[in-house]
């Protein structure tokens, strides 16, 4: 592979629109039974924009949910008398809320399974030896969700000094190059904070390349993303092979 | 040194069997072993032919109590519908050290969520899983099957005969779970599903009646997510056989499993019908109160937006 070829990153996001909504709800500490639909819709759309910018493989479900949110929003804005008569005169958000609540319960159940998994790592038995899982394909983020990473990227974008729109720069940055840069930093410093990595950059394209490089390294199991507190800074840590 | 000639206690035999077993051992297996041995051998071995399940349970209990009391470092664990000897948790670190276990691969959150849905709702179709997660589960499902944590368990009676999925024995062992009924909150999560399926079915029927179309099937699970235009794969026989080949290990009983499971489902539904009503009522009540408040909320949002 020559360094001139653009590094094609095929990324699949396994989290869906419900994950994003729950993420936003948690982030803003919103009451799930009383969602401010206008605000949520705007935030949701903003995240979609960032994901498009990063060329992430956005499942069709994300677009469908965007349409659903718009529809709920428009229904909420109608005066009560003019709302289309749904049986039981339901709150237009109800279907969505029901779905979110159910999903959240399963997320909790999944977290419990995760705890059992960790606990089992310390339990050995003649019968248990065979259970070593193979690695999962694509991005299997354990500690940090894809939306945490996108949030961090978004923050960095906001803070970046405005790009010079006059000159057109030749594309000096490539994902492959950024992968080398990050791996090098890992070797030298042992870890890297996401905000510091992206913080120094001014060119949006450079930031995108860096971000994609990070995702690729996570996928290739060279690096792990850790977040010590919810919605806090994200650190990249190399994965040691034995 | 234990003497070859001395007749062992039942508890001793059970301990020895648990030690030698390669997988969790059920009461039935132990009982069968003792009885089969009694047929084969002469002498004291025959004494154990009459052993009952209660005898065995008592023996295991006592064995476990003594192991724990004397802090031997191991105890009897109940896992995957059976028993096995395993180390005391607080000694795990040293074992990991000795066996040179680095950091193990853990499952990602989406994988755990998919597993949770299957574990609580089994047997279930891919559509049902996707209806909860709101996104396709193809790749994850394939992966879980390759890891043998999930298996195909017969086909649904719904149109298209989609595959049904269930968790495996290995799933129970991997998480150290006794059996599926032991999962926390399983009653509630199964009940929610019944209530929702009911609600969706009623909605669909009402809509159909109003629009004077033919009544849609019960397989409208994905409509809750996507409305009309569904971008999720609907189950077609062609797709199923390509993506989700049934697990090779011991699936000749797949047909039996499916019919058994269907009977279970029916039984479970009967139990829960009464509860469903309670459940729905509570939710409606909560919601009525909020209707008044939220109109104000949105108006405030709107005025903020404009300014």
Image (cartoon, rainbow, N blue to C red):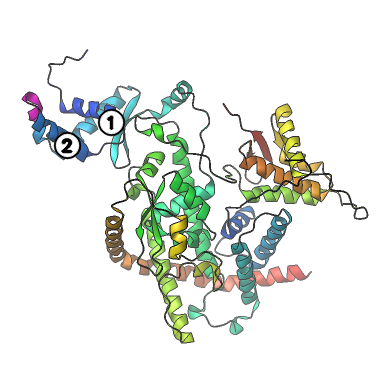
> Front-most of B188 and A183?
A183
| Residue drawn where x is 40% and y is 51% of the image | B119
Residue bounds of the magenta highlight: B41-47
Q: Residues within 10 Å of mark 1 (few under 14, many from 20)?
A: some
| Residue drawn where x is 12% and y is 21% of the image | B7
| Residue drawn where x is 52% and y is 80% of the image | A86
Which quadrant of the figure has residue B215?
bottom left
Q: Is residue A73 above or below residue B12?
A: below
Q: Earlier in the sequence, mark 2 or mark 1?
A: 1
Q: CA distance from mark 2 to mark 1?
A: 14 Å
Q: Is residue B61 above or below residue B301?
A: above
> Front-most of B193 and B156?
B156
Q: Disc 2 vs disc 1: Cβ atoms closer than 8 Å?
A: no
Magenta stretch holds residue B63: no
Which quadrant of the figure has residue B176?
top left
Looking at this view, name the residue that lies furthest to the top: B1
Q: Is residue B78 above or below residue A67?
A: above
> Front-most of B158 and A109?
B158
Residue at label 2? B31
> Residue B4 location, x and y as percent?
16, 16
> Residue B251 location, x and y as percent?
32, 50
Q: Chain of mark 2?
A: B
Residue at label 1? B21
Viewport quadrant of the C terminus of chain B:
bottom right
């Amino acid at each position: 592979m020559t360094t001139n070829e653009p590094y094609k990153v095929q990324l699949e996001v396994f989290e869906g629109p419900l994950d994003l909504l729950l993420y936003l709800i948690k982030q803003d500490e919103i009451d799930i039974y009383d969602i401010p639909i206008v605000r949520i819709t705007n935030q949701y759309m903003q995240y979609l924009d960032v994901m498009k910018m990063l060329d992430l493989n956005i499942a069709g479900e994300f677009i469908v949910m965007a349409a659903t949110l718009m529809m709920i929003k428009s229904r909420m804005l109608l005066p009560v008398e003019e709302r289309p008569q749904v049986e039981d005169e339901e709150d237009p958000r109800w279907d969505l809320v029901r779905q979110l609540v159910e999903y959240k319960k399963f997320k909790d159940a999944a977290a419990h399974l995760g705890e059992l998994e960790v606990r089992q790592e310390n339990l050995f038995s003649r019968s248990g030896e065979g259970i070593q899982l193979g690695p999962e394909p694509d991005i299997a983020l354990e500690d940090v969700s894809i939306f945490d990473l996108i949030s961090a990227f978004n923050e960095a974008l906001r803070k970046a000094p405005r790009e010079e729109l006059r000159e057109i720069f030749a594309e000096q940055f490539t994902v492959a190059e950024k992968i080398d840069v990050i791996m090098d930093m890992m070797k030298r410093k042992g870890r890297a904070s996401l905000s510091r990595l992206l913080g120094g950059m001014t060119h949006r394209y450079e930031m995108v390349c860096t971000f994609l490089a990070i995702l690729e390294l996570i996928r290739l199991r060279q690096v792990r993303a850790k977040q010590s507190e919810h919605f806090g800074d994200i650190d990249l840590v190399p994965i040691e092979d034995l | 040194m234990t003497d070859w000639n001395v007749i062992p206690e039942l508890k001793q035999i059970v301990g020895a069997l648990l030690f030698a077993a390669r997988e969790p051992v059920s009461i039935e297996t132990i009982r069968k072993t003792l009885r089969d041995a009694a047929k084969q051998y002469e002498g004291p071995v025959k004494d154990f032919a009459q052993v009952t399940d209660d005898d065995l349970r008592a023996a295991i209990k006592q064995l476990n109590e003594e192991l724990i009391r004397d802090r031997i470092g191991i105890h009897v664990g109940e896992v995957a519908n059976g028993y096995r000897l395993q180390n005391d948790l607080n000694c795990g670190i040293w074992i990991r050290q000795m066996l040179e276990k680095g950091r193990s691969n853990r499952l990602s959150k989406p994988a755990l969520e998919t597993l949770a849905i299957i574990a609580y709702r089994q047997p279930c179709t891919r559509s049902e899983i996707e209806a909860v997660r709101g996104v396709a589960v193809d790749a994850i499902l394939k992966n879980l099957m390759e890891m043998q944590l999930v298996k195909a368990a017969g086909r649904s009676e719904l149109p298209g005969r989609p595959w049904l999925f269930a968790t495996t024995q290995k799933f129970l062992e991997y998480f150290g779970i006794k059996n599926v009924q032991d999962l926390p909150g399983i009653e509630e999560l199964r009940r929610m599903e019944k209530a929702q399926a009911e609600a969706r079915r009623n909605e669909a029927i009402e809509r159909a009646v109003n629009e004077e179309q033919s009544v849609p099937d019960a397989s409208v699970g994905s409509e809750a997510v996507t409305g009309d235009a569904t971008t999720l794969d609907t189950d077609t026989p062609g797709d199923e056989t390509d993506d989700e080949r049934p697990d090779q290990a011991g699936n000749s009983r797949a047909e039996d499993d499916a019919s058994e499971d269907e009977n279970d489902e029916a039984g479970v539904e009967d139990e829960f019908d009464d509860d469903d009503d309670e459940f729905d009522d509570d939710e409606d009540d909560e919601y009525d109160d909020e209707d008044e408040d939220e109109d104000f909320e949105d108006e405030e949002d709107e005025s903020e937006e404009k300014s």
